[in-house]
Image: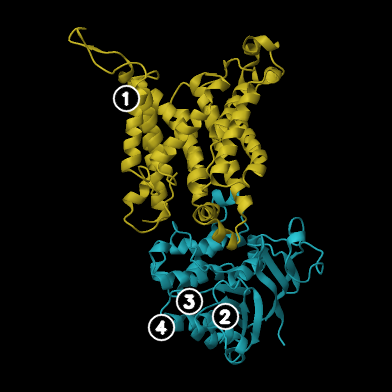
C-alpha cells in the first residue's frame, strides 16, 4: 500500500470515529455512562501514551506522571477561572492574586508548557539515575509537587488545599477526543521519526546507543520533557472532565493506575495503551460497578453474597492478575494495531 | 610516513587496587590495520573502553588526529592508592563522553554483540545516522525533514547492500545468524562515518571459514571507506593475515610490538601465551 493511500485511510477512519461519536452522543445523551466513560477513557489514553513514551519507548522507568498532570491541571484551572467568579473561588485568599483570564486553548497549552518546564528542571538531577532509583526519585518529586501546591502560603495562586472550580469545561465528547487524538498523533509521529528511533535505541541498549553517537542525557531529557508536556495537557483535560479540582486527588495511586494501563496495553505500544485505557476506565467506572451495590434477588428475599462496597476492587485485581499472567507483554506487546493488518512486512505505519 | 590517527600515551587504568592497563602506549597511523592481542584478562577491552570514552583512564593521554580527546591524572582517592607509573606527568583532565568521541570519527563494535534488539536490521543502521541529523525534534516530528530522512534511508540501504544484508533489511536484528549479526554491527559502526574503526573481537565464535571471509571483508571496507582499523582479536590466523602491525599486552603491560612476523617469533609473546618452562 502506498503511503498516501494509507494516510487517506487513516483520515477516513478518524472522521468515521468522530461521526460515530456524534451519533452516539445524540442517541445516548451527554450524561450517559457510555459517553462519560469515553471522555475519561480518551483523557487516560493520552496520559497513558505520554507515559508509554517514557517508560515503554525510551526505557526510563518514571513514576512522576501524576505530579505533571497535577501541574497541568492547576495551571489550566488557575489561568482560566473567569474574573467574575474568582472572588467566590478564592474566598479565603481575597480573590487570589491573578488578575487575568486566558482563553481555554491557551490555558491547555500553558498547562503543557509549565509541566514541561518543570520536567526540564527536575530532569537535570533525576535523569542521571537509572531504573528503580529513577522511579523512586520521580515518585518523590511528584509527591513534593503535590505538597507544594497545597501549601498555604501559595494559596493566593493555588487556593491551597481548597477546591478550584467554575473554570471552563467541555460538555460534549467531541473536543476531548479531538484534543486526545491530536496529542496522540503527535506522539506517534515523534516515535516514528529519527528521534523516536534514538529513544528506542536507548531503551534497547544504552551503551550501544551512546557508542553510536546518541547523547544519552540530551535524549532522555527530551523524552522526559515531551512526555511531561502531554501529561500536563492530559491533566488539564482531566480537570475539565472533573469540573472541580483538588490536589489531593493526584496521589501516587493515580500514577500506578496509569502505569497499570501502560503495562496491560503493552510497554512500547501506543494502540495498546489506548485500548487498555478505555477497557480500564470502562471496567472501573461502569462494567464492574454492579459489584459494589448490595443486590437482592427474588423480591428482596435472597441477598447475593459478596456484593458490597469495595468488592469491585477485588474482582478488578483478579482481572488484572489474569491479564498479567496470560498476556505477559500486555495486550498488544510491542505491536501496534496496524501491524496486525499489514502482513509481516514494514513496521513503519503512520497513523494520525 | 602517513598521518598519526590515534596516539595513546602512558595510559593506566586502575580499578580499586587492580591495574588493568598499565602504562600502555601505542600509535596507529592512517590506513593501517593494527591488532591488539594478549591472553584472556590482559586488559585489551579495557584499553578499548579508555579510547572510546566508556572508562576514564586513571592516568595518561589519548590523542586523535593530533587532538587530545582523553587525558587524566590520579586525583581524589586514587591519588594515594595509585599503583601505576608516571604519576605527576599529566596535570590536565579532558573527558569526552562516548557519543562525542563517536562524533569525532571513532566508531566501535562490541565483544558481546550489542545490536538494538527490538529493531529491524534497517533501523539498526538508521539509528547510527541519527548522530549526523540536522533536524531538531520539532521538524523531525512534523516531517519537515523528509529530504534528510530519505537521504538517510537511502544511505542505510546502500550500506546494507555493500555487505549483502539488503535482503534481510526488515527482519529483526536478533533473528539473524551470528555471523551476519557481527557484520551488521560493523555496518552500523560504518554508518557513523568513522575514520577509525575499533573492532572488539570481530571473529569471536566464528568458524575458520567465516573468519577467513571476515578478514577479506575488513580489508574491503578499509579500502572502500578509507578507514584505519584497530582491532582486538584472538584468532591468530586472522590477526597474522590482515594486520600491518601488532601490539601484544599481558597483565595490562605491553610486552611486544611489531609486524606479524616479528611478533610471532618474539620469545616474550610465546611465553605469555604458552607459559615458560620453569627448569
Q: Which residue is mark 1?
A: A287
The colour style of the image is by chain
Secondary structure at numbered mark 4? helix
Decide: is A16 above or below A221.
Answer: above
**Residue at mark 1: chain:** A
Chain identifier for the yellow-coloured part of the image: A
Image location (x, y in percent) of residue A11: 41, 43
Residue B209 is labelled as 4
The C terminus of chain B lies in quadrant: bottom right
Residue tagged 3? B203
Look at the numbered disc 1 and give the secondary structure of its residue. helix
Residue shown at the point (34%, 23%) measured from the top left? A312
Chain letter of disc 4 in the image: B
Real-space CA distance between mark 3 and mark 2, rounded to the nearest whole angstrom: 16 Å
Between B140 and B76, the one nearer to me in the picture: B76
Gap between marks 2 and 1 measured at Cα: 65 Å
Query: Along the polypeptide, which appears first: circle 2 or circle 4?
Result: 4
Q: Chain of mark 2?
A: B
Pointer 1 and pointer 4 on the same chain: no
Seen at 63% across and 31% down, the residue is A110
SS for dot 3:
loop
User: In front: mark 3 or mark 2?
Assistant: 3
Residue at 47% x, 80% y: name it. Answer: B214
Query: CB of mark 1 within 8 Å of CB of mark 3?
Result: no
Same chain for the residues under marks 2 and 1 in the image: no
Q: Chain of mark 3?
A: B
Q: Quadrant of the rendered structure where residue B164 is? A: bottom left
- Residue B129, compared with residue A197, is above or below; it is below
Q: Which mark is residue B39?
A: none
Q: Colour of chain B?
A: cyan
Q: Where does label 2 land, which residue? A: B222
Distance between the alpha carbons at the discs numbered 3 and 4: 11 Å
Amino acid at each position: 500500500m502506498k503511503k498516501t493511500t494509507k494516510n487517506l485511510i487513516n483520515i477516513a477512519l478518524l472522521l468515521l470515529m468522530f461521526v460515530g461519536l456524534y451519533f452516539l452522543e445524540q442517541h445516548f445523551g451527554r450524561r450517559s455512562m457510555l459517553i462519560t466513560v469515553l471522555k475519561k477513557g480518551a483523557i487516560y489514553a493520552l496520559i497513558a501514551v505520554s507515559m508509554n513514551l517514557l517508560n515503554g519507548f525510551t526505557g526510563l522507568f518514571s513514576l512522576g506522571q501524576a505530579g505533571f498532570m497535577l501541574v497541568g491541571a492547576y495551571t489550566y484551572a488557575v489561568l482560566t477561572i473567569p474574573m467574575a467568579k474568582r472572588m467566590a473561588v478564592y474566598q479565603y485568599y481575597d480573590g487570589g492574586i491573578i488578575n487575568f483570564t486566558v482563553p481555554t486553548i491557551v490555558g491547555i497549552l500553558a498547562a503543557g508548557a509549565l509541566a514541561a518546564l518543570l520536567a526540564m528542571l527536575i530532569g537535570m538531577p533525576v535523569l542521571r539515575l537509572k531504573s528503580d532509583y529513577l522511579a523512586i526519585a520521580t515518585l518523590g518529586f511528584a509527591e513534593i509537587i503535590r505538597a507544594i501546591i497545597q501549601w498555604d502560603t501559595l494559596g493566593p495562586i493555588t487556593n491551597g488545599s481548597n477546591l478550584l472550580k467554575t473554570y471552563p469545561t467541555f460538555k460534549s465528547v467531541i473536543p476531548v477526543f479531538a484534543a486526545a487524538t491530536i496529542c496522540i498523533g503527535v506522539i506517534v509521529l515523534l516515535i516514528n521519526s529519527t528521534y523516536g528511533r534514538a529513544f528506542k535505541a536507548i531503551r534497547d541498549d544504552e551503551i550501544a546507543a551512546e557508542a553510536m553517537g546518541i547523547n544519552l542525557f540530551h535524549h532522555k531529557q527530551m523524552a522526559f520533557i515531551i512526555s511531561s508536556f502531554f501529561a500536563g495537557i492530559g491533566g488539564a483535560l482531566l480537570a475539565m472532565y472533573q469540573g472541580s479540582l483538588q490536589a489531593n486527588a493526584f496521589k501516587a495511586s493515580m500514577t500506578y493506575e496509569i502505569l497499570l494501563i501502560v503495562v496491560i496495553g503493552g510497554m512500547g505500544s501506543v494502540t495498546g495503551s489506548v485500548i487498555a485505557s478505555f477497557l480500564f476506565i470502562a471496567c472501573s467506572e461502569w462494567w464492574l460497578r454492579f459489584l459494589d451495590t448490595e443486590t437482592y434477588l427474588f423480591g428482596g428475599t435472597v441477598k447475593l453474597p459478596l456484593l458490597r462496597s469495595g468488592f469491585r476492587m477485588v474482582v478488578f485485581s483478579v482481572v488484572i492478575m489474569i491479564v498479567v499472567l496470560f498476556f505477559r507483554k500486555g495486550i498488544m506487546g510491542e505491536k501496534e494495531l496496524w501491524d496486525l493488518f499489514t502482513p509481516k512486512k514494514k513496521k513503519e505505519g503512520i497513523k494520525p | 610516513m602517513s598521518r598519526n590517527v590515534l596516539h595513546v600515551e602512558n595510559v593506566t587504568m586502575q580499578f580499586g587496587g587492580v591495574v588493568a592497563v598499565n602504562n600502555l602506549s601505542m600509535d596507529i597511523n592512517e590506513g593501517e590495520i593494527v591488532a591488539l592481542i594478549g591472553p584472556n584478562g590482559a586488559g585489551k577491552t579495557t584499553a578499548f573502553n579508555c579510547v572510546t570514552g566508556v572508562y576514564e583512564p586513571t592516568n595518561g593521554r589519548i590523542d586523535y588526529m593530533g587532538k587530545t580527546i582523553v587525558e587524566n591524572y590520579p586525583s581524589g582517592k586514587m591519588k594515594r592508592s595509585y599503583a601505576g607509573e608516571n604519576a605527576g606527568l599529566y596535570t590536565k583532565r579532558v573527558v569526552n563522553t562516548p557519543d562525542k568521541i563517536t562524533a569525532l570519527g571513532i566508531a566501535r563494535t562490541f565483544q558481546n554483540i550489542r545490536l538494538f534488539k527490538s529493531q529491524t536490521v534497517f533501523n539498526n543502521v538508521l539509528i547510527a545516522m541519527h548522530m549526523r541529523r540536522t533536524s531538531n525534534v520539532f521538524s523531525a516530528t512534523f516531517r519537515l525533514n523528509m529530504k534528510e530522512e530519505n537521504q538517510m534511508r537511502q544511505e542505510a540501504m546502500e550500506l546494507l547492500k555493500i555487505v549483502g544484508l539488503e535482503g534481510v533489511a526488515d527482519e529483526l536484528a536478533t533473528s539473524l545468524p551470528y555471523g551476519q549479526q557481527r557484520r551488521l554491527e560493523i555496518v552500523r559502526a560504518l554508518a557513523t562515518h568513522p575514520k577509525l574503526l575499533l573492532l572488539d573481537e570481530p571473529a569471536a565464535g566464528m568458524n575458520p571459514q567465516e573468519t577467513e571471509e571476515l578478514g577479506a571483508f575488513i580489508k574491503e571496507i578499509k579500502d572502500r571507506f578509507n578507514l584505519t582499523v584497530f582491532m582486538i582479536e584472538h584468532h591468530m590466523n586472522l590477526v597474522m593475515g590482515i594486520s600491518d602491525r601488532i601490539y601484544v599486552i599481558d597483565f595490562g603491560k605491553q610486552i611486544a610490538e611489531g609486524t606479524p612476523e616479528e611478533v610471532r617469533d618474539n620469545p616474550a609473546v610465546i611465553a605469555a601465551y604458552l607459559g615458560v618452562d620453569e627448569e
